[in-house]
Image (cartoon, helix red, strand yellow):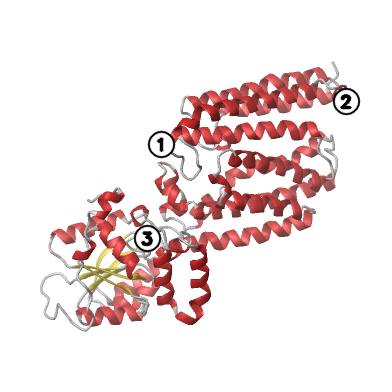
Amino acid sequence: MRDLHPSDAQAEAIPVDRMTAVTLERKIFPEATGPLPLCVDLDGTLTPADTLMESLIAPRSIAQLARALLALPFTGRAAFKARIAANTALDVSLLPYNLSLLRYLETQKRSGRHLTLATAADRAIANAVAGHIGLFDEIIASDGTCNLKGRTKAAALRLRFGNEGFSYAGNDASDVAIWEASGGAILVNTPPGLARRVGRTIPVEETFPHRAAPWSALLRAMRPHQWVKSLLVFIPIFTAHALGDIAAWINAMLVFAAFCATASSIYLVNDAADIAADRRHPRKRHRPFASGALPLATGLTMAGFLAVLGAGLAAASGTLAVIATYAALSVAYSLKLKQMPLVDVFLLGALYTIRLFGGGVATGHDLSLWLLAFSGFLFLGLALLKRVAELGATQQGSSGRRGYMAGDLPVLQMLGCAASFASSMVLALFVQREATAAQYASPGLLWGIVPVMLFWQCRLWLSTARGYMHDDPIIYSARDWVSWIVGGTVLLLLLLAYSLPL
């Protein structure tokens, strides 16, 4: 099988001009013998991706994209696709392809079967895909005037090959009209009910299994494991010693849910914006958007719903301004600031601290400057650790779109370790305050938290240096039994210091 992810030089070496020009007024198979010519759909069949949606999120010019969207009601869908295709920076070599189908097509090609890429995508996109795959003899695609989908595609293929003069590989209900005009069907990721319907009237040559509904992929893309970060909103209740404040707990749960919904919305938008970089990453290429397991339209629709839900919960807890600030900074991070060295890690640290601040606003228990200082250094250290892990995993000239170079690794490690030690220093100064001692029955026990927290952070840095660190320290810690022991020890020391006089 050809390499599906060749270098740019390899991709350019595949001549696109060898493709036979499509002339719909002429049939070239009036009395075909042997297997019928095989026409293959692109979106949802050859690739699980939607190339139009992918082109929309990868424009060369935002202004041209806006003009194309405004002109859509007047120019029609075919012209819109042509304008988007001319403006896209989509790299078709990074698209996820259906490997089982490609192996089947290679077998058919070797047997001498005529292969046609028949797609509603614009011809520019179709040419690029066909040139990359290197299997198709010709292309039939939308051309800026005719949107080649459904019955329109069926009519074009009937005119090209004759009624029932071709076989067609498709995937969904929009392909039914084409299968009805064909002499054979290849079902790719087709829902079981639709597959039975097609099979009753059309000979089925081959079936490629239907993939499960994208709900599990959607849940993974929402990253519920990251919701643990929002538990920070409950800390002001503990630091204020207000465990019996029921109203504070209710508002804290509301703002917790608001942060979770908003964060998941941002993760979906971030992954959609970062889809090309994720596909180049050795692990992130398996993410739902990058792998094609989650359609972009489905994920972005859910992102909008979660954003509205988060805003409603924030309004109910009196933290709408906090959640709006968090969302604005997160979007700015996803779209631009993540590409700016050091700005990105300071912003990541701030996004943790905003959760603490939101908890204080919702519960009515103000945060001390000591807590803000400790959290600021702690979260800056974790953000730097995340970048060091990512950069260490790639060991290339840059880490995705982060803007860092491999030579920056020692500097980032130094800054991160310094931030970790600074957080422990702030914690130690807080513990020795007379005001702190007055709030606890046994304040001396609080000193045990300082070396435990420092040990935990040093262990994270050592794990990162040895290459063990997942590129997200939160995920690593959630799976690390030592981190659980550290967390339990800190909680136990707090409870003993508060309630046990020595």
Q: Secondary structure at mark 3?
A: loop
- State the residue position of label 3: 210
User: Between 73 and 104, which is closer to the camera in this rendering?
Assistant: 73
Per the model, the C-alpha gap separating discs 1 and 3 is 37 Å
Disc 1 marks which residue? 396
N-terminal-most mark, 1 or 3: 3
Please indicate whether residue 320 sits to the left or right of residue 287 in the image. right
Residue flagged by tag 2: what amino acid is it?
A: Ala
Q: Position of residue 334 (x, y in %)?
A: 56, 50
Residue 139 visible within the image: yes
Cα separation, mark 2 vs mark 3, equals: 64 Å
Q: Quadrant of the C terminus?
A: top right
Instruction: Count numbered badges in the picture.
Output: 3
Identify the element where label 1 is drawn.
Answer: loop
Label 2: state its secondary structure: helix
The residue that appears at 43% across and 65% down in the rendered structure is: 87
Mark 3 surroundings: few (<14), some (14-19) or many (≥20) residues within 10 A: some
Look at 13% across and 61% down and name the residue there: 111
Residue highlighted by disc 2: 435
The type of residue carrying mark 1 is Gln
Q: Position of residue 239 (x, y in %)?
A: 80, 34
Which of the two marks, 2 or 3, is nearer to us in this view? 2
Dot 1 and dot 3 residues touching (CB under 8 Å) = no
